[in-house]
Amino acid sequence: MKTKETPRYLVPSLVAVALLALFIWWANSHLDNYKIQVLNLIAINSILALSLNLIYGFTGMFSLGHAGFMAIGAYVSSLLILPQVQKDMIYIIQPLAWPFSVLQAPFFVAVLAGGLAAALLGLLIAIPVLRLGGDYLGIATLGFAEIIRVVFTNLTPVTNGALGLKGIPDYANLWWNFGWCLLTLFFMIRLVNSNFGNVLKAIRDDEVAARAMGINTFKYRVVSFSIGAFFAGIGGALMASLVTTIDPKMFGFLLTFNVLMIVVAGGLGSLTGSILGSAVITVLLEWLRFVENPVDIGSFHLEGIPGMRMVIFSLLLILIILFRREGLMGMRELSWDAILRRFSRGGETR
Amino acid sequence: MSFEMFVQHLFNALTLGSLYGLVAIGYTMVYGILRLINFAHGDIFMLGAYFVFFGVTLTKIPWGIAIILAVAASAVCGIVIDRIAYRPLRDAPRISALISAIGVSFFIENLSLVIFTGLPKPVYQPEWLVEIISFGNVRILPLALIVPAIAFALVGGLLWVVYRTKPGLAMRSISKDIETTRLMGVSVDKIIALTFGLGSALAAASGIMWALRYPQIHPFMGVFPGFKAFIAAVLGGIGSIQGAMVGGMLLGLIEIMAVAFFPALSGYRDAFAFILLIVILLMKPTGLMGEKLEEKV
């Protein structure tokens, strides 16, 4: 919601953060659990969308591997915060392997470790795969995500196999989620508006030209990919603590599809678009649950159709790509400049 | 492993490989012409199977007619998908069409989930297809002979269309240069529709045989065969029909033999194809039989 290029936007930014804090404080005591859950999802989806937007929207690398990075982040962080008793209880097929069986960490460190593990894997994957471009890259990253899922299903001594992890402590409340979300947003704004960000955009717009300018495009793409993987890992770690139960099945292509949908709907190459997109899509997905429940309109009784939600959702993606390819925001940003100008103009006319 | 076992595995691999190959041809033809990974192709495979088995159960029409109708209906589905979701995006960035394809794929899967429900449906296998025949100590299903035979016959027919007929000539021409072909007076959109129709018909045929071989159908049955068939297409060299068939066979062989020789790896079976894909993309991105694709500036 802010573009911090000069300190003169410091005041509105701080005010916005304070307002957000006030809102969270209010929400915690006044909203029911379901609404709080939706707010949590918005924050986590924002993190995921921002990270995919960095990879795809700003660097032009079509990656379909987000679910894989989320899985890494989720498992690493969950293993660090699971209480000892719980670990002994859920690993019934095979006991938990050594380093994970004794390691414990506070939530912040655990989430950070999840992100770092995902970034490390992103780096390892990036070096071979980023030699590819376009849709081949999409398929290869999708392949990696699937491989991670298959490995996690079979690596029973670490991941508990298909049974997954249960009873993960639910530390991820509004404060943590929105805190990480703000941190991600701040980092992304600084990154995208830096020289580094300009290079990424140059690579996206014309890689051959960027290479001709003497830029080591491969290096920049690898770094951008790893940063994206880092935040995907953070998002996965928070998601795991929010839903408290994870298994390898959860991290399928559908998860990547959701994030892709948010990024496309919000606008590729727009950070504020990603935030708006995740708010709109998350709320829409929840709201669409009404088509799956029976409704009474006067004397009419409409039977709910289970599964209809995803039908409408995928139809929406097709419609967006056919009729409004640039999404909500296109490549524009919602900046303090524009907001302040609108406010001051409103004042003048009055 | 005894020789008899090996031969049986070989026939299983041949069956699986021809099923992958048939689906791979659709990917390779569409990619060769439009540079688009048609994500919805695996779902046509699923629709083909559902059309037959729902058609037979609901209307009691004979199997032969049901299969022909289902293949035709699937071809129409393929053409309609192209018309609605891909044709408006011909001039858009390639990734837009790919996202549209992902959307279509999810749409078909979830609509099928609503219509057909998520419960896997058992498929009735006619006796004569599953009565084991023995050659000495080698015991195989008639299906393991019929499926490859049908697959190769279909591929032969397709090769005839592509290399011996006018529309086939137009198809090959479009894959070289779409704009020049248009200038030559070829109705490009019709030829592309024909390509989608042929590819979808082959995918449906594969789906029907898949359902007979592994007697169960469910709305997501096309997802993994779809991915793997695409990998087979890349393996054989994208754009090459013979290559797609070779890639399919190779993938079938690797999947079956790896599990047969190393049973401990059976849990990782679904990962083989993806590992193979990444290796082939890095070693030889044009595939085994593909032409060199130039990077256009």
Image (spheres, coloured by chain):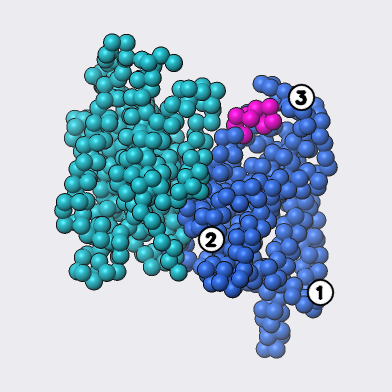
Chain colours: A blue, B cyan
Report the residue marked by disc 3. Answer: A88
Quarter of the figure with residue A242:
top right
Report the residue marked by disc 2. Answer: A264
CB contact under 8 Å: marks 1 and 3: no
Nearest to N terminus: mark 1 or mark 2: 1
**Residue at the (29%, 15%) spot, across then down:** B132
Mark 1–mark 3 Cα distance, whole angstroms, equals: 50 Å
Nearest to N terminus: mark 1 or mark 3: 1
Nearest to N terminus: mark 3 or mark 2: 3
Residue A11: which disc? 1
**Residue at the (16%, 53%) spot, across then down:** B165
Is any part of residue A297 visible from this angle?
Answer: no
SS of the residue under disc 1: helix
Quarter of the figure with residue B45:
top left
Amino acid type assigned to the residue bearing label 2 in the image = Val
Residue A153 located within the stretch drawn in magenta: yes
**Residue at the (71%, 45%) spot, across then down:** A117
The chain letter under disc 2 is A
Mark 3–mark 2 Cα distance, whole angstroms, equals: 43 Å
Which residues, given as a range, are shown in magenta? Answer: A152-162
Is B141 positioned to the left or the right of B220 in the image? left
- The answer as to whether the residues below labels 1 and 2 share one chain is yes
- The answer as to whether the residues below labels 1 and 3 share one chain is yes
